[in-house]
Image (cartoon, rainbow, N blue to C red):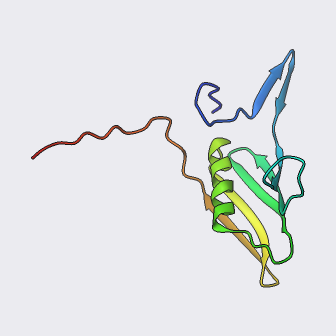
Amino acid sequence: MNNPSAPGIFSRYVQIDKWIFEVKSVRAIRVDGFGEPYSAIANLTLNGNSAYIDGLLTREDDEFTREDYQTFMKISQQLEVESVDFDRFKQRRRVSDTVKVTPTSSFKTKLKLVKV
């Protein structure tokens, strides 16, 4: 599940001495540089092969964009989860959704031009 040699895959487990530390929660902030004021925040909780996004807040008049959604899918792929559940408020209504995560392939297909 956690291949340290595979590019773009984060290890969710780290062993130090007789302890194994498991990443179970991630705080995400939308910002250009660390330490600068951020425009959005979310919590990502990992449980087995799934993740749950909650606490998604953006500044007033600042939407959660398609690009933001794609970024969360990328981190989900890198953390090797199979599905992501999230709750958010849209037009003053709570919306829940589950999204299946497409795994990243560790190899790229080589294309070859063939003349017919």
Residue extending furthest left?
Answer: 116
In this orientation, which residue lies closer to the viewer: 29 or 91?
29
In this orientation, which residue lies closer to the viewer: 51 or 77?
77
Name the image quarter holding residue 92. bottom right
Q: Quadrant of the N terminus?
A: top right
Residue plotted at (67% across, 49% down): 76
Name the image quarter holding residue 68. bottom right
Residue extending furthest top?
Answer: 17
Residue plotted at (74% across, 64% down): 86
**Is 55 above or below relative to 101?**
below
Rendered location of residue 58, percent (x, y): 83, 68
**Is 36 above or below relative to 97?**
above
Residue plotted at (83% across, 63% down): 40
Question: Left of 48 or right of it: where is 15?
Answer: right
Residue plotted at (70% across, 50% down): 50
Rendered location of residue 104, percent (x, y): 53, 44
**Is 38 above or below relative to 97?**
above
Name the image quarter holding residue 22. top right
Rendered location of residue 11, percent (x, y): 71, 32
Question: Left of 95 or right of it: where is 59?
Answer: right
